[in-house]
Image: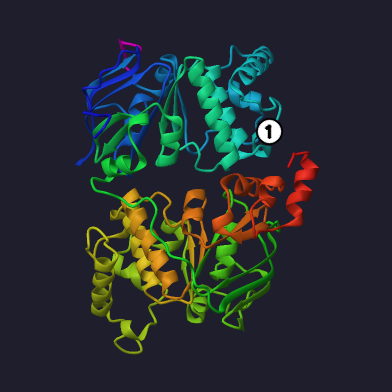
Amino acid sequence: MKGGIAAGRQETAAPLAIELRGISKAFGTVQANKDISIQVAKGTIHGIIGENGAGKSTLMSILYGFYKADSGDILINGTPTTIPDSQAAIRAGIGMVFQHFKLVQNFSVLENVILGAEDGALLRPSLAKARKVLADLAREYELEVHPDAVIEELSVGHQQRVEILKALYRHADILILDEPTGVLTPAEADHLFRILRNLKEQGKTVVLITHKLREIMEITDTVSVMRRGEMTATVRTAETSPEQLAELMVGRKVLLHVPKGTAKPGRRVLEIKDLRVRDVDGVERLKGIDLSIRAGEILGIAGVAGNGQTELLQVLGGITQGTGTVILNDKSLDLTGKSSDGQSRRRDGISHVPEDRQHLGMIMDFTAWENVAFGYHNDPAYQKNRWLMDNGAILEDTKGKMERFDVRPPIPTLQAKSFSGGNQQKIILAREIERNPDLLLVGQPTRGVDIGAIEFIHKRIVALRDSGKAVLLVSVELDEIMSLSDRIAVMFDGHLMGIGPAESATQVGLGCLMAGLGGADTRAMSGWDISAAADEQRLSTGTRG
């Protein structure tokens, strides 16, 4: 492979910020890291990619002091360094920004930054010092955030800036970011990349853990690929491609974009009018949603997590109650009464792949065949008689589903928790898709799923559409929404901000709508119906269109 070099034999003229030699780590019989060697040059952005379970997070946790390697050596700036805990990592100049932020929600930005790094018993001098340092850092790295703002009132993008400021305040020269764009809008991700470039220009070293190949290609100088606990290659980003990286990750060629013909929409399957949902605290999460889906099309719902997408799936799936009108195949669905549950929805022709597979999609301590029967245990094919289920029939049905959906290992008697995330998702998809639903609700279909399994899952969703079924797809992955959808709707703060054809959607335009804004970029998307609320929000915030 052009640009590829064997792990452990990387030649680099630049001084090294990090060098790991022969790192191994096992958890019981599971070998998480096996004889890994890697070199990260100073002042570069170095990506680390790999499938789930490849050992990326374990390796970085060793570097940050969360785990102790069974063998191997760590060198920081050329010096052998022992890192028994995170405090030692911080002293060595290493900072880490986790996928799930470590911030105290009711503390201010300043209070979070100095937490654990106070200069003494009196907080006032520490706060005064931090205020000045933050102002300097903000100017230098485009990390603007109000020092007195309370964390819970900040956007996710600004909270991430606070995490980076925390690390820089502690004099980190090496910054590790774990899946940093998972909850960001495209505009926030672009701003993060500007921050990372600024850090690089100032001589900082950035290690980026991500599964998004587009981000690797856009922002990194060098990328290391891991597979099954081993380092398979380190390559210069400019001399590789997403397709080559995917093949290195999986060990075979992978289709990054599933071929999809033109949709042939048929009759209207679902129509929603003025749909509203309140949570247990009485807060309105859906605020008058109107949309429809036809047979033979995929409608993708784009938006940053927490803007009503979950409530939309749950009220349609019978998990949550709401008000308004939902018509499925010309029949009004009950949104508040006894027949507003999941069983009734299945009888009406709706299948649901929930966003949280481990809490709503499966019972992890139960076997695969028991999970396949959940929700469908009254199926006559699963019944011996009125009182007893035919476990043998369910086992045989599960075997067939596992074979058709390439579940590994194909063992129906294995507990759900023993399967990888991707194989858990395949079991749920097999259960729901093979019920031949009129409408499939699918939330975050590839969250935490290996790239090889992503290809398979996308193919099955497209095949369901091509068989004349309607699909409502919710995903925080904008690439996934744009690749799979025939039409796209964007949600923000419980409102539908716009809806239109996927072919004319742009990342910039969708990003504006995801942030609750209208403007020229959204109006440029031909065929789109943009909510008046988008332009009202833009004007109220003073954002230019």
In this view, the residue farthest toward the top is 79
Up the image or down, 117 lies above or below 509; here it is above
> Does residue 50 show up?
yes
Q: State the predominant SS element of the stretch in magenta.
A: loop
Q: Amino acid at mark 1?
A: Val
Q: Could you say where residue 484 lies in the image, as x and y percent from the top left?
A: 47, 59
Task: Determine the residue positioned at 36% across, 18% down.
Answer: 41
**In the image, 10: left or right of 106?**
left
**In the image, 488: left or right of 208?**
right
Q: Could you say where residue 65 lies in the image, as x and y percent from the top left?
A: 37, 25
Up the image or down, 17 lies above or below 22; here it is above
Up the image or down, 132 lies above or below 433; here it is above
Q: Could you say where residue 290 lies in the image, as x and y percent from the top left?
A: 68, 67
Element type at mark 1: loop
Quarter the N terminus occupies: top left
Residue count near mark 1 (Cα–Cα under 10 Å), binned few <14, some 14–19, many ≥20: some
Up the image or down, 55 lies above or below 372; here it is above
In this view, the residue farthest toward the bottom is 385
**In the image, 251: left or right of 539?**
left
Quarter the C terminus occupies: top right
Give the residue at mark 1: 150
Closer to the camera in the image, 259 or 209: 259
Closer to the camera in the image, 308 or 530: 530
Magenta stretch encompasses residue 81: yes
The magenta segment is: 77-82
Residue 33: image quadrant is: top left
Residue 430: image quadrant is: bottom left
